[in-house]
Image (cartoon, grey):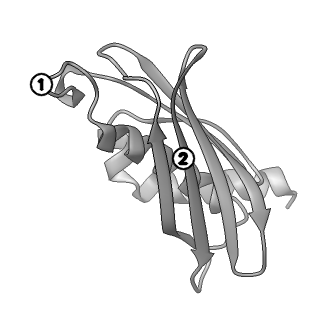
Amino acid sequence: MDADAIAKAAADAMWAGDTASRSLGMRLDGIGPGRAVLSMEVTATMVNGLGVCHGGLVFTLADSACAFASNSYNRRMILQSSQITLIAPARLGMRLSAEGIERHRADRSAIYDVRVTSGDEVIAEFRGHVRSIPGTLY
């Protein structure tokens, strides 16, 4: 099986059990070795008293993109630490896209950067440090 097929099979296995992402309306828009793109529309149930999307939901989208990208080799990886910088507010009706890209991979750990955008506007930047745990996804 080639690397793209492994990434797709791993993503399918993850997606099947990821009720949290699906319940938020996330879509998996792209997957490949060390990369993933997820998107989500900001709905009325996601905005706070200021009329903008809760930062935690932007984080959840970025975290999900990091998870799909880091698990794309069919190795179980979990987030060890992360940092997010919220740059611009996400507003009702915006379609957010989170692209996760591998920056470094070692034997048992890796670093992924995720950029969350809406069109040309950058909403957030996320960096996740992940580590492997025993097992595979499929």
Quarter assignment of residue 67: bottom right
Residue pointed to by mark 1: 49
Residue 126 - label: 2
Q: Quadrant of the N terminus?
A: bottom right
- At which x and y percent is residue 18? 40, 54
Query: Quick check: 114 left or right of 27?
Result: right
**What residue is drawn where x is 49% and y is 44%?**
62
Say which of 14 and 123 sits in front. Answer: 123
Q: From the viewer's perspective, is residue 28 above or below residue 120?
A: below
Q: Secondary structure at mark 1?
A: loop
**What residue is drawn where x is 33% and y is 51%?**
19
Q: From the viewer's perspective, is residue 31 above or below residue 104?
A: above
Quarter assignment of residue 94: top left
Q: Amino acid at mark 2?
A: Phe
Going by the picture, which residue comes out furthest to the bottom?
Answer: 134
Q: Amino acid at mark 1?
A: Gly
**What residue is drawn where x is 49% and y is 67%?**
81
Is residue 128 visible from the viewing direction of this image?
A: yes
Label 1 CA crowd tier, 10 Å (few <14, some 14–19, many 20+):
few
Q: Secondary structure at mark 2?
A: strand
Query: Quick check: 78 left or right of 111?
Result: left
